[in-house]
Image (tube, rainbow, N blue to C red):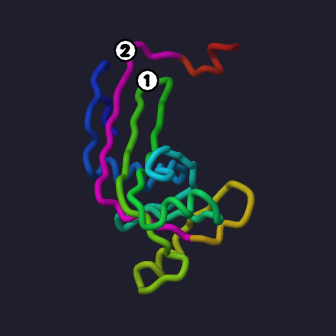
Amino acid sequence: MLDPRPGQIETMGDGECVTALRDHDLGRIAVVDRGVRPLIFPVNYFFDEGVIVFRTAPGTKLDLSLGASVGFEIDGWDPVQGVGWSVLVKGIAHDITQPRGAPTGRMRYWPVRPVAPGSRQHWVGIWANEITGRRFRTEARRPPLMAQRA
């Protein structure tokens, strides 16, 4: 990733956003509960072919995401360089637990590895309608928090 000028927020290019999504495996899915309350859940995921795939157990996340417009976000922060970035995906979530064709069947073989304990038998795919990203640099570079406490 290119470093932005200090004090500026810059837009990340499409290729940079896709690379970031492919290079990471932990993000957050945002859903809306009864059209009122936003809820955000961390998930381990895999991204390819414009689709984010994650596994989950029955519950709120599964109930509110299927067939709905959702947001998905990843981000990063380098405290030494003072550079932060985020990528936001907007799309529709679909149940791919029982694949209906070759593309969704293939996704079930993607390396989605949940780290949270418990069974994650439901597969969800988010088809990206829009992917955007931005990054910034702080004026002053700060040492990592652990170094400040020492």
Q: Is residue 119 left or right of residue 19?
A: right
Q: Is residue 16 left or right of residue 77?
A: left
- Looking at numbered disc 1 in the image, what kind of residue is underneath it? Gly
Number of numbered discs overlaid on the protein picture: 2
Quadrant in the picture for residue 141: top left
Foreground pick, 125 / 148: 125
What percent of the width, then of the height, locates residue 106?
47, 79
Dot 1, how many residues are within 10 Å of its Cα: few (below 14), some (14-19), or many (20+)? some
Q: Quadrant of the C terminus?
A: top right
What percent of the width, then of the height, locates residue 24?
49, 51
What percent of the width, then of the height, locates residue 86?
40, 39
In this rendering, the answer to whether 78 lies above or below 132 is: above
Give the magenta-colored segment's residue range.
Answer: 123-142
Residue 82 marker: 1
Please report contact status of discs 1 and 2: CB closer than 8 Å, yes or no: yes
Mark 2 falls on what kind of element?
A: loop
> Residue at left 49%, top 82%?
99
- Looking at numbered disc 2 in the image, what kind of residue is underneath it? Glu
Q: Answer with mark 1 or mark 2, whichever residue precedes in sequence.
A: 1
Dot 2, how many residues are within 10 Å of its Cα: few (below 14), some (14-19), or many (20+)? few
In the image, residue 127 lies in the stretch drawn in magenta:
yes
Magenta portion: prevailing SS class: strand
In the image, residue 132 lies in the stretch drawn in magenta:
yes
Mark 1 falls on what kind of element?
A: loop
Q: Quadrant of the N terminus?
A: top left
In this rendering, the answer to whether 106 lies above or below 79 is: below
**Residue highlighted by disc 2:** 139
In this rendering, the answer to whether 58 lies above or below 24 is: below
